[in-house]
Image: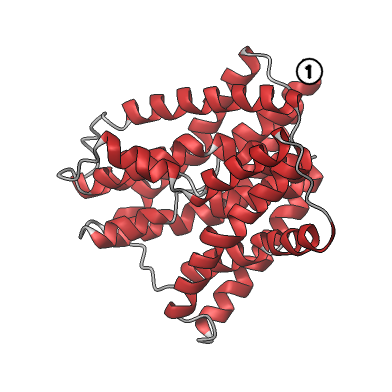
Amino acid sequence: MTGALINTQLTIIIYLIIGFVLYKTKIFTAHAQVFVSDMTVGVLLPTSVFISFVKNMSLDLLTSLALILATAIVIETVLYLLTKIKWSWFSPSESAVLHYGMLVSNGGLIGTPVIEALFGSVGVVCCNVFLIPTRIMAYSAGESIFNPSLKRSFKEIVHALITNRIIIAMAIGLVFVLFGIKLEGPAYTALANIAACLGPFSLMLVGSMLAEKITITKDMIEKITVVCLIRLFAIPLVVLGLCVLLHFDFMTTAIIVLLMGMPVGSTCASFSKRYKGNEPFASSAVLVSTLLSTITLVILMSVMETIFTIL
């Protein structure tokens, strides 16, 4: 499995480079970024989730998904509580980046293609169920990290949840499964082909974002290192220990740990810019953690395989 992940990471690097070059050559403009981002989040990802549900759902998988969701809720709740800790070494604007980075990873744009490459469409189902609490937290609490005066009401959070395209895609997929509705022929082929575009589009989008001008100063290096160590190693390794204690199977453990080891969410830089925070530090954290994750994810997979071999 480590070998498969290495190949996947090399493929991801190529997609990132393509996105980087397209941005630098002005083929991937700022307007194109907005379009591809909307297309990826609004069409490709929901379609991928729907196809995965229709293709793989069963009673056994539903039981596993309930366990995965419960685990995700516990983890995200603990991470949220940890964001209340004040880091005297970090300025308030830098702490916002650290806290958001702990709370929200780039599991959607980068995590989904990685998990799909390793575990197929079943992995996509598990991945997006696990990410439900993260997506809720990114909207309800994540944004308020950069703007403390922003308070989301319970009604707003519920509305955001039930109108989220990915949640809607899951719900429609469950309806198809529960009522025995079959999606076959040209309709299935067309949607499956659209879903297959998720990996290339999302990763080239990330690559184009990495091409934007970012300056990393000497003062940033140590603090960015701390952010990366927490995001890429500390959190996933603690979660790995939890999964082992709970006797999760290898696939469930790998999906959860790899998603928790994803880089800082790209929205970190967006929120920092929107609320006049420390945008250079946020952008640098996203860039460095994204590049390092191509190596750290392989290390995490190797650790997991070693542990499960011993067990």
Residue that appears at 68% across and 19% down: 248
Q: Residue 270 in the image: x percent, y percent?
A: 34, 60
Whether residue 304 can be seen here: no
Q: Which quarter of the image is occupied by the C terminus?
A: top right
- Name the foreground residue: 10 vs 147: 147
Task: Please say whether residue 16 is visible from this viewpoint.
Answer: yes
Mark 1: which amino acid?
Answer: Ile
Circle 1 crowding by C-alpha within 10 Å: few under 14, some 14–19, many from 20? few
Up the image or down, 104 lies above or below 214; here it is above
Here the colouring is secondary structure
Classify residue 202 as left or right of residue 153: right
Closer-to-camera residue (92/151)? 151
- Residue at the spot 26% in from the left edge and 30% down from the top edge: 84
Percent x, y of residue 234: 49, 31
Q: Secondary structure at mark 1?
A: helix
Report the quarter where the N terminus lies: top right
Residue at far right of view: 185
**Mark 1 highlights which residue?**
310
Residue 287 or 272: which is nearer the viewer? Answer: 272
Report x, y in % for residue 173: 66, 43
